[in-house]
Image: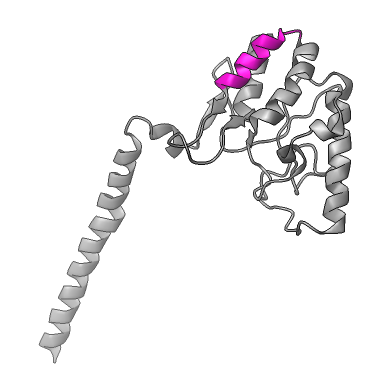
Amino acid sequence: MLTTIARQSAAAVRVLLVMTLLLGIVHPLGIWLVTRLPGLSGPAEGSVVRAADGTAAGSSLIGIDPVAADPAADPWFHTRPSATADDPDGLGPGDATTSAGANLGGFDEGLLATIGSRRERIAAREGVDPAAVPVDAVSSSASGIDPDISPAYAALQVPRVARVTGLPEDAVRALVADATTGRVLGFLGEPTVNVTELNLSVAAATG
């Protein structure tokens, strides 16, 4: 009996040592080495984006709606609304520590009223007819911190950003183009504009 226990204990120790080596050292080291491959190191480190001086300014995966010092002279591009924002319409920065959507159906009266209010406020901010406001400008994403907007929503904001910053509209459109990502593999999804990267470009262009 003691021989059987000793044999089983020895086998258990050997399995423990092997699994510790494989799962505690070899596997993590292999994953780390894979993340060092070209094109993977950035995403593995959080997709950090940097300001013109090289300091970390956020992640390209997280969109935080910027707040202008003077709302009447707003120089920034804005993200989609967020269900976690303090503003009753969901405009303004969402809570980056809480990822959540509105979880309301398309026929919810409160949601429809909120969308209408968002449309009016965004139209007033951009100086356009409410009918010109794109869908993604008034609908919150599932995460509440989506960094991407449609090219249509970015184009809507170009005249205001150009007017406030003093940059030519063509220059602002070029910045939008640089922050635009096309369809995956050329046919999946829709083109998107990364607001985090775009606003960093605007800040760099205006000094």
How is the structure coloured here?
A: one colour
Residue lying at the far left of the rendered structure: 3
- Camera-nearest residue between 14 and 177: 177
Prevalent SS, magenta region: helix
Q: Position of residue 154 (x, y in %)?
A: 69, 26
134 and 21: which one is in front?
Answer: 134
169 to 99, vertically: above or below = above
Residue at image point 45% right, 34% down: 186
In front of the other: 5 or 188: 188
* Label total for image: 0
Horizontal side of residue 185 vs 89, given as left or right: left
Q: Quadrant of residue 44?
A: top left
- Quadrant of the drawing holding the C terminus: top right
Q: Residue at x 39, y 33 (%)?
A: 41
- Is residue 52 positioned above or below 114 on the image? above
> In this view, which residue lies farthest toward the bottom?
1
At x 66%, y 42%, the residue is 145
Q: Is residue 162 visible?
A: yes
**The magenta stretch spans residue 171:** yes
Q: Residue at x 77, y 41 (%)?
A: 138
Q: In this orientation, does residue 207 appear?
A: no
The percent coordinates of residue 128 (x first, y second) are: 85, 26
Q: Quadrant of the N terminus?
A: bottom left
Residue 19 is a magenta residue? no
Residue 16 in the image, given as x and y percentages of width and height? 24, 67
Q: Position of residue 146 (x, y in %)?
A: 64, 41
Which residue range is magenta in the image? 166-178
Q: In the figure, 5 relative to 126: above or below?
A: below
